[in-house]
Amino acid sequence: MALRLKNAAAALSSTNLTSIYTCPTNFTARIKEVWVTNVDGSSAANITLKWTDTSASATYDLLSTFSVAADNYLQLSDANIILEAGDIFKAQASAADDLTV
């Protein structure tokens, strides 16, 4: 089986739940690491990370309303989140235009 490496990123421009990565058909994906950066120079912002298991029609919290300080970052190293075909990794910010994932 061939290995295909891919980066996925998004600037969270709203407070809506945003899809960061959807696992393609006929693939299994492993998210090894997640970085959340607060680009706001003066205010903290909260991040929520979710995973949608499309085969079960359910969405689960991976990290809920975690505060990231102004001009700082959160690193989830060795995350090892496994996504099957169609599963979606999502993020939501408490403030628009403050966080990138």
Image (tube, grey):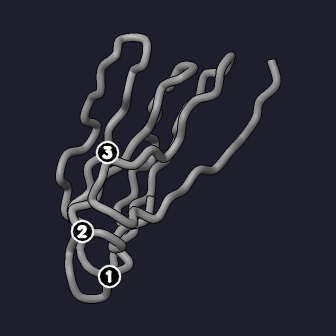
Query: Mark 1 or mark 3, which has the lower sequence index?
Result: 1
Counting from the top left corner in percent of width and height, residue 2 is at 82, 24
Mark nearer the N terminus (3 vs 2):
3
Q: Amino acid at mark 1?
A: Asp
Query: What residue sits right under mark 2 in the picture?
Result: 95
Q: Quadrant location of residue 51?
A: top left
Residue at x 27% of width, y 59% of height: 15
Marks 1 and 3, how far apart at CA: 19 Å
Q: Nearer the viewer, residue 12 or 71?
A: 12
Q: Is residue 1 above or below residue 31?
A: above
Query: Residue 44 placed where, x, y %?
Result: 20, 74
The amino acid type found where label 3 is placed reads: Leu
Q: Is residue 59 above or below residue 6?
A: above
Residue matched to label 3? 49
Which residue appears at 44% of the width and 58% of the height? 101
Residue 2 lies left or right of residue 66; in this view the side is right
Residue closer to the observer: 56 or 39 = 56
Relative to 67, residue 90 above or below: above
Q: Verify CB contact (< 8 Å) between mark 2 and mark 1.
A: yes
Give the labeled residue for mark 1: 40
